């Protein structure tokens, strides 16, 4: 952000959560957006949206989840849950004096948004949910059940070969083969270049395979279907019709389950359509936020 101010929040359980704003805490604003990124991702995935909405005059909050990047919590993986992340966001809003906001989430960030909307419905004006799922993730990831079979193998590898797995996680992404797999599997290669992938993999390498394993199991265990129909927040559900990570029928299901939701599926959009087509997605998100805001 051009006018970023950086802070650390000390949470109720003693963790330090890093967050940034483009406004001075205590200032009142009616147009505050809180971004929530995906599984072992970063706020880099919101690069185009942060630039756009800041230029449009919106107040923005970005944060590192507990256990991620500049936030503490890596030594307490068991406490990295969607409930605790939602509480962290609540404490950030309370600290900066925000009484309502717009939530935007991508992939695992959808779980964060839905959990927050369940716990603090009075604080959420509207939500925008991109490429998420309300099904247990092992049942839908890559549109197969294979991840459920790979899960115990990764658990064993973390125990038996922790240093080797950590080294591959940190440096394996720099191989041309891995870059190509990530680009073609998660993005639209006609719209996204290798420079974006390299930055993404560099940030990914800062996080560990143990955190990935923990969070994907949190997504598997998250009982979001039990309460999603009770969430009254106006919601825009977005996705790409070429999503190879979370099949876009999941976006239709989320739209059907939420009482006040509308659907937007883009042609040729991947799992990260806000990166593939930033101008189109930015305009659609802004229209939704402004519509009867």
Image (cartoon, rainbow, N blue to C red):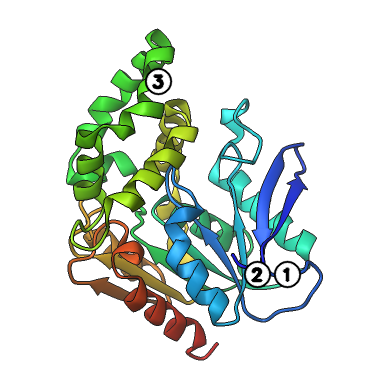
Q: Earlier in the sequence, mark 1 or mark 3?
A: 1
In this view, which residue lies farthest toward the right?
Answer: 26
Please, what secondary structure does the residue beneath circle 3 have?
helix
Count the labels in the image.
Answer: 3
Which marked residue is nearer to the observer: mark 3 or mark 2? 3
Q: Which of marks 1 and 2 is nearer the N terminus?
A: 1
Q: Which of 284 and 233 is in front in this view?
A: 284
Q: How far apart are marks 3 and 2 (CA)?
A: 42 Å
Q: Which of 215 and 162 is in front in this view?
A: 162
Which residue corresponds to mark 3? 167
Which residue corresponds to mark 1? 98
Which residue corresponds to mark 2? 123
Q: Distance between the residues labelled 1 and 3?
A: 41 Å
Please, what secondary structure does the residue beneath circle 1 have?
loop
Provide residue 252's location: percent of width, then percent of height.
27, 67
In this view, which residue lies farthest toward the bottom?
Answer: 292
Q: Quadrant of residue 163?
A: top left
Q: Residue 133 carries which label?
A: none
Q: In which quarter of the image is residue 48?
A: bottom left
Mark 2: few/some/many CA within 10 Å (<14, 14-19, 20+): some
Q: Determine whether label 1 and label 2 are within 8 Å by CB.
A: yes
Provide residue 54's location: percent of width, then percent of height.
57, 75
Quadrant holding the N terminus: bottom right
Please, what secondary structure does the residue beneath circle 2 have?
helix
Q: Determine whether label 3 and label 2 are within 8 Å by CB.
A: no
Mark 3: few/some/many CA within 10 Å (<14, 14-19, 20+): few
- Lateral position of residue 203 relative to residue 133, left or right: right
* Residue 231 can be seen in this image: no
* Residue 33 can be seen in this image: yes
Q: In this view, does 69 lie above or below 86?
A: above
């Amino acid at each position: 952000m051009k006018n970023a101010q950086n802070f650390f929040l000390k949470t109720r359980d003693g963790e330090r959560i890093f967050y940034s704003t483009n406004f001075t805490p205590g200032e009142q604003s009616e147009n505050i957006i809180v971004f929530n990124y995906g599984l072992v991702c970063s706020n880099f995935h919101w690069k185009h949206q942060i630039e756009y909405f800041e230029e449009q005059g919106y107040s923005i909050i970005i944060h590192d989840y507990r256990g991620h990047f500049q936030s503490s919590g890596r030594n307490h993986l068991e406490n990295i849950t969607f409930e605790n992340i939602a509480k962290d966001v609540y404490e950030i809003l309370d600290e900066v004096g925000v009484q309502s906001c717009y939530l935007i989430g991508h992939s695992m960030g959808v779980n964060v948004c839905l959990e927050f909307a369940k716990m603090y419905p009075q604080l959420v004006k509207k939500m925008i949910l991109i490429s998420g799922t309300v099904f247990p993730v092992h049942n839908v990831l890559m549109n197969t059940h294979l991840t459920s079979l790979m899960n115990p193998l990764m658990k064993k590898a973390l125990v038996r070969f922790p240093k080797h797995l950590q080294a591959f996680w940190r440096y394996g992404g720099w191989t041309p083969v891995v870059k190509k797999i990530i680009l073609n599997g998660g993005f639209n290669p006609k719209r996204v270049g290798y420079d974006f992938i390299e930055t993404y993999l560099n940030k990914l390498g800062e996080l560990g395979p143990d955190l990935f394993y923990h969070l994907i199991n949190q997504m598997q265990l998250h009982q979001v279907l039990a309460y999603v129909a009770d969430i009254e927040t106006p919601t825009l559900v977005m996705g790409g019709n070429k999503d190879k990570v979370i099949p876009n029928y999941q976006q239709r299901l989320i739209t059907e389950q939420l009482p006040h939701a509308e659907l937007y599926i883009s042609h040729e959009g991947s799992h990260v359509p806000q990166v593939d087509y930033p101008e189109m997605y930015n305009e659609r998100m802004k229209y939704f936020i402004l519509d009867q805001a």
